[in-house]
Amino acid sequence: MGTPSVRRPGKARLARAALRLYPPAWRGRYGTEVLALLDDTGGGLRAALGLAWRAIPAWICPPRQLHDPEARMRASLGTVLAAGAMLAGVCLVFAQLTQLQGFRVHGSPVVAGSYAIFDVAMAVCALAAAAGGLPLWLVMLRRARREHRARETAYLMLPVVAPVAWLTTVATVARLLGGPDGVSPGVFFAVTLLGFGAAAASSAGPILAMQRLRPRGPAVQLAVRAAALATAAIVVAGVASATALTGLFLWARGFAGYHSGAVLGGYLAVVAALATTAAISARRGTRAARSS
Amino acid sequence: MTSRLDRWADPPLLVLASLADEPKHGYAITQDVAQTMGVTLGAGTLYAVISRLEAQGLIEPLDTVDRRRPYRITMAGAEALAQQSSRMSKVASLAQARLRTGLGMAGA
């Protein structure tokens, strides 16, 4: 076997950074060897670029011997939760700015039908998330409390605390700053931003708890299947909202004057990106659940 | 054109060929492939290949020595390498024979 001739560890810093782009399971299995090789060869920009490029297939199609269905399911749940929470937030903003403002296209069944599909899909999504997520949440909460893990307990309480705090803020703001026509656009924007913050905190809490507690078993499998159903429902809701919004933009002059085309385009792009992310991750999670 | 024909030098084949005589760790494989076959394998390419070959059961890891894990070719890997090198050898012989004929006719 050959032995290294020159050691230039300083030049391997970039390549070491590129190694962080790999999935944790890949790094756990090959990371030490790759670092040793980089120490032997010196690394450098070329090695860093090569490593970064090869990290993509390592994520898309991980080697079979590194396949951990439980870890895959947890990762999938985290991604679906984060993307789903953001998508739900975006959809609620849609509902607030259209349905609840009374924007309709009289005589067109497209917008009215899309509103109805949107409402049913959001209800299915909420029910699926609650039915699938609650058992896993309870399992983790029970374990965190039994093992006196205060940080994990706090993470798990975030989906309860953050929405309640946000709703309290909204109610207070509406009472203090609201007039007969509601609140000003600036206040609405600030409250919306706070809502997205609350949604991010609500999803980040269980994700962090899952990373630390590493739950396994039937509760995780149930949550993955429920996440797939919730994702399908929220994708339907996203498509329905996009259809309604496009219909309003095309046929309701009052709405078109109220919102610009850039907002419509931005909304469609965000819904498409979040729905795609959630759908791909949910699919990978259900495949892992089937193989476990 | 030469670069396209370089696809014969598939990294998995080079790694299998390098491991055909004795187990080697990553650095030893890159050195061997560079010296004997004239191809430089980067760390990213090498470990992408190693992970795939390991998944296919064509190589197997041995115990780590000082952060460096040697790999050994398996029976399945040796068979796959023998089949592929036999095919390549036939193509090489045929190509050389036809080139000699073609060049001879061109020179006549």
Image (cartoon, rainbow, N blue to C red):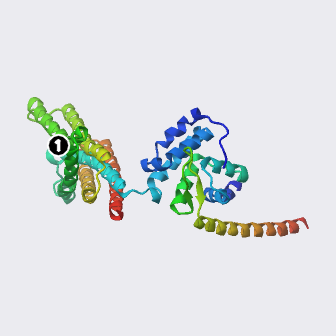
Residue A272 at what x, y percent from top left? 33, 51
- Identify the residue shown where x is 58% and y is 55%: B71
Q: Say what secondary structure mark 1 lies in.
A: helix
Q: Is residue B63 left or right of residue B90?
A: left
- Circle 1 chain: A
Which residue lies most toward the right here?
B108
Q: Is residue A197 left or right of residue B60?
A: left
Is residue A107 or residue B51 the one in the foreground?
B51
- Identify the residue shown where x is 56% and y is 42%: A36
Is residue B43 or residue A263 the one in the foreground?
B43
Badge 1 local density, few (<14 within 10 Å), some, or many (20+)? few
- Identify the residue shown where x is 50% and y is 60%: B55
Residue A152 at what x, y percent from top left? 25, 41
- Residue B40 visible, this orientation: no
Residue A17 at what x, y percent from top left? 49, 38
Residue A198 figure quarter: top left
Which residue lies most toward the top here?
A176
Give the residue pinned by disc 1: A160
Residue A231 at what x, y percent from top left? 27, 56
- Number of callouts in the render? 1
Residue A261 figure quarter: top left
Quadrant where the C terminus of chain A sits is bottom left
Q: Amino acid at mark 1?
A: Val
